[in-house]
Image: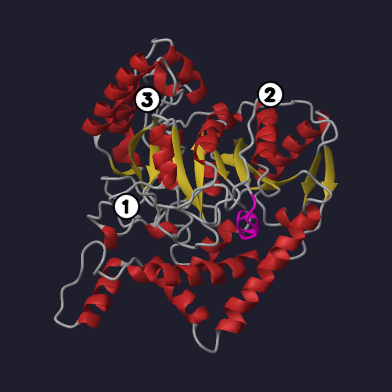
Amino acid sequence: MNPFIQQSIHSLIPLLAEGKLSSVELAEAYLEQIDRFESELNTFIHIDPKMVISKARRADQERARENNTKPLRGIPIAVKDLITVKDMPCTAGSKILEGYIPPYSATVVRRLEEAGMIVIGKTNTDAFGMGSSTEFSDYGMTKNPWNLEHVPGGSSGGSAAAVAARLAPIALGTDTGGSVRQPASNCGVSGLKPSYGRVSRYGLIAFGSSLDVCGIFGRDIDDIWPIFSTIAGYDQLDMTTSKLGVPSIDQVNLDLTGLRIGISSEFFPENLQPEIKLALDELIRQLKSLGARIVEVGLAHIHLSVPVYYILAPAEASANLARFDGIRFGPRAENEKMWDVFFNTRSQKFGDEVKRRIMIGTYALSSGYYDAYYGQANKARNLIKQDFQQAFENVDIIFTPVAPTTALKIGAHHDDPLAMYLEDIMTLPPSLAGLPALSIPAGLDGQGLPIGAQLIGNVFQEDRLYQIAKVIQSVTTFHKMVPPLISSDFKGKAQK
């Protein structure tokens, strides 16, 4: 394995600046890794190697001419295929957008390209971000590099698997109800969901507009922060973005004395996988030894998160996906009658999970049911927000599992959509409340599958999450774990 692809972003920056590594060499190393493992993992929907090398060559020329004015220049980044990149195919993981090439880039992509980064490819996703496993992509499922018989999580499973397998040093995803944090946990990498309104949604193909957030995958928190600092901030093209300044991180205080860490019994149910509880108990013990104080917090309405989310998100999706009708984007099912064009295109090109959620959402918004379902769900969402607001009066962060289990086997919940929805039970509450949350590696279970820990912060306090994650990663080595698929001594295919 090329040693450069084992380097973190904060290690690559000085190598590029000092001329010990060129952007072309780095791009070639990642493209070689993709060529070696992509057929087994299916992490990407689109890659253009010639374009990547061309942009890398230009980055080298600009670096020499401008004397390293952009630290991120020439570093590759993978982008989830729900985020538009100008002149690059964007499918949202769905055949209904096959062949669509957007004429503009999302704000997050534009800001990263202005910083000199190179989009290496578009990563696989559950169609329109609707799924918890990346099994519901119309372009084939993505597999977990820790064990090819297991899912990487979803819907940003392609991005998570790409970072874990060293097919990209960093990746963008989207998080509506856990679609960054849950696959990050399953794949043994770090994943940040910023506060709602911290990062522009312009150019993200919408699923649930009041929930969608662009998030980041990295091997550790020091890789995530410079990307977050680059993409965060007000955007006049997205009026939901906040004008609040993005915090800078100059020096992190590793002394946690007096820090209040909230623990809620609602996040530690009896059916939690025992190995997850053991791993998180050990992290809590270490945080206490570093001076943190553990505070029990009550979150009385957290148990409503799943039903609330699966009314609100499908309702918003049914409205957002109405535009995909075979007329304005992608292919169409030809027919003499206009309404048959709409019906046949949507019935043939939308996958089963997308259809299921559109139907649920349309029902919840229909006359006679709006108040009983959508209206009540919004009221319950406010109660969940109030629970968190009260909790943060007494604690600085809240510490939870990311999911009730480690990565599921492929096909485990194909016949039981409700069981699949329950995989998001730990990640939905902060999404509904618009809070920042971070998944970081916390160990391995008995099958050798990664375990993740979730840190939830108060609104717009991503810097507090960075501090705690930095401390944890200073006293543990979980973020340095490498999947057996790509380790130098790995001889077989899927780990049994």
Q: Are marks 1 and 3 in contact (CB under 8 Å)?
A: no
User: Mark 1: few, some, or many residues within 10 Å (few <14, many ≥20)?
Assistant: some
Q: Nearer the viewer, residue 311 or 182?
A: 311
Colour scheme employed for the rendering of this structure: secondary structure
18 over 4 or under it: above or below: above
Q: In this rendered view, identify the residue nearer to me: 473 or 206.
A: 206
- For badge 1, the amino acid type reads Gly
Q: Which residue is mark 3?
A: 74
The location of residue 448, given as percent across then percent down, is 54, 37
Q: Main secondary structure of the magenta part?
A: helix
Label 2 and label 3: CA atoms lie apart by 26 Å
Secondary structure at numbered mark 3: loop
Inspect the image, locate mark 3, and give the three-letter code of the amino acid beneath it: Gly
First in residue order: circle 1 vs circle 2? 1
Residue that appears at 76% across and 60% down: 387
Q: Of callouts 2 and 3, which one flags the residue occurring earlier in the amino acid sequence?
A: 3
- Which residue bears the numbered disc 1? 140
Q: Which of the 4 image quarters holds residue 252? A: top right
What is the magenta range? 427-435
Query: Residue 463: horizontal and vertical position, in percent?
Result: 66, 37
Quadrant of the snapshot with the N terminus: top left
- Hey, which quadrant is residue 324 in on the image? bottom left
Residue type beneath disc 2 = Gln
Is label 2 in a helix, a strand or a loop?
Answer: loop
> Which residue position holds label 2?
251
Residue 496: in sight, yes or no? no
Q: Spatial distance from mark 1 to mark 3, Cα to Cα?
A: 30 Å
Whichever of labels 1 and 3 marks the residue nearer the N terminus, that label is 3
